[in-house]
Amino acid sequence: MKTAERAHTPNEHWEKVKLDKCFRIAIEQIDENLMYWPEFLKKKCKERFTRIRQMLVRKRRMRLKNT
């Protein structure tokens, strides 16, 4: 998320938010934190989160399958 208070320091302009491990709660957190953002950007963030999560699950499965 961008924060207006950090506009004078561009390298710290963005704030990271740690999401919950539970998928549903994490999606709700995205909704809460991006409350004033356009719907299109919220949807993109949720899709990106879903893609990364699916990739990690696949990676974990492959690692277990190989051993």
Image: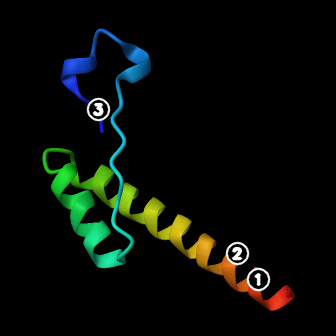
Separation of residues labelled 2 and 3 (CA atoms): 31 Å
Separation of residues labelled 1 and 3 (CA atoms): 36 Å
Q: Quadrant of the C terminus?
A: bottom right
Numbered disc 2: secondary structure: helix
Viewer-nearest residue: 53 or 37: 53
Residue where numbered disc 2 is placed? 59
Residue sitting at x 27%, y 15% = 7
Q: What residue type is disc 2 on?
A: Lys
Mark closest to the chain's N terminus, 1 or 3: 3
Q: Give the left or right position of residue 65, taking residue 41 as reference.
A: right
Q: Residue furthest top?
A: 8
Q: Residues within 10 Å of mark 2 (few under 14, many from 20)?
A: few
Numbered disc 3: secondary structure: loop
Looking at the rendered image, the disc whose residue lies closer to the viewer, 1 or 3, is 1
Q: Is residue 58 above or below residue 10?
A: below
Q: Residues within 10 Å of mark 1 (few under 14, many from 20)?
A: few
Residue sitting at x 24%, y 28% = 3
Looking at the rendered image, the disc whose residue lies closer to the viewer, 2 or 3, is 2
Marks 2 and 1: CB-CB under 8 Å? yes
Residue 2: mark: 3
Q: Give the left or right position of residue 64, taking residue 25 as reference.
A: right
Residue where numbered disc 1 is placed? 62
Looking at the image, what colour scheme do you see? Answer: rainbow
Q: Quadrant location of residue 2? A: top left
Q: Position of residue 36 (x, y in %)?
A: 13, 45
Q: Quadrant location of residue 6? A: top left
Q: Residues within 10 Å of mark 3 (few under 14, many from 20)?
A: few
Residue sitting at x 39%, y 71% = 21
Q: Quadrant of the N terminus?
A: top left
Q: What residue type is disc 3 on?
A: Lys
